[in-house]
Image: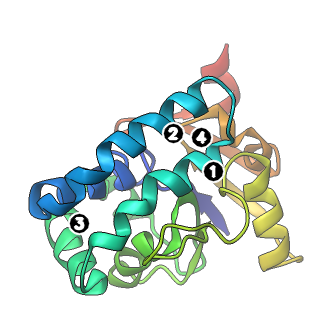
Amino acid sequence: MNVYDFDETIYNGDSTRDFYFYTLKNKKSILKYIPKQGFYFVLFALGIITKTKFKEKFYSFFKSIKNIDDFLEEFWNEHEKNIKEWYIKNQKEDDIIISASPYFLLLPICKRLKINHLLASNVDKFTGKYDGENCWGEEKVKRLDKYTSDYSIDEFYSDSYSDSPLANLAKKAYIVKGNELYDWNEYKK
């Protein structure tokens, strides 16, 4: 099986950031959340709150999105084009996507692409509240272990060395920069 990060790996950009700006453009009611988001960003930057807590506060804008499932479909109608062609060509039935982005945000695009295995941050789409930790770094390995105890990662792909815990479990790992794939260990040198 092959394991992939999502943002900046198989998706050109950051899906959560793109969703936020798409929402700002289409739902002006979320403008009222900007001061709160800025405040919590400063607390995170100063190390006062965790990344998970910051994201939870940032995602509070979800409360203002009526019919969020329909809105997500509209978002992916515009952003599906950001799925990288190299991934489409190499996609396999047993691929696993592991991402820090919210599960509910990635689920519609994974269904469209017929990706059957998605592990991501468990975030309530109505409140922005987390159920557990942000799916990042070592947490990705914990999620994979919980999802299936019997696995062997043939190839792993990510844009970030924060995913080294997963890369270390793979027979072969690649760092992704744009549409270019580089050997994980060679790129670090």
Q: CA distance from mark 2 to mark 1?
A: 9 Å
Contact between labelled residues 1 and 3, with CB atoms less than 8 Å apart:
no
Question: Which quadrant of the rendered structure holds the C terminus?
Answer: top right
Q: Label 2: few (<14), some or many (≥20) within 10 Å? A: many
Where the N terminus falls, by quadrant? bottom right
Residue 72 can be seen, yes or no = yes
Dot 2 amino acid type: Tyr
Q: Amino acid at mark 4?
A: Tyr
Locate residue 16, reporting x and y percent: 38, 55
Please state if 41 lies on the left or on the right of 38 as rendered: right
Eyeballing the image, is 5 above or below 152? above
- Amino acid type of the residue tagged 1 in the rendering: Lys
Q: Please tell me which residue lies in front, 133 or 157.
A: 133
Q: Check disc 3 and give the amino acid type.
A: Glu
Give coordinates of residue 151: x percent, y percent.
82, 72
- Observer-nearest residue: 161 or 63? 63
Q: Which residue is label 1 attached to?
A: 53
- Indicate the quadrant where residue 89 lies: bottom left
Q: Residue at x 72, y 45 (%)?
A: 137
Mark found first going from the N terminus, 3 or 1: 1
Q: Which residue is mark 3?
A: 80
Residue at the far right: name it: 149
Q: Residue at x 57, y 26 (%)?
A: 45
Cβ–Cβ under 8 Å for marks 4 and 1? no
**Residue designated by label 4:** 174
Q: CA distance from mark 3 to mark 1?
A: 29 Å
User: How busy is the neighbourhood of tag 1: few (under 14 within 10 Å), some, or many (20 plus)?
Assistant: some
Measured from the top left, where is residue 133 in percent x and y? 72, 59
- Judged by depth in the image, the label closer to the viewer, 3 or 1, is 1
| Mark 1, secondary structure of its residue | helix
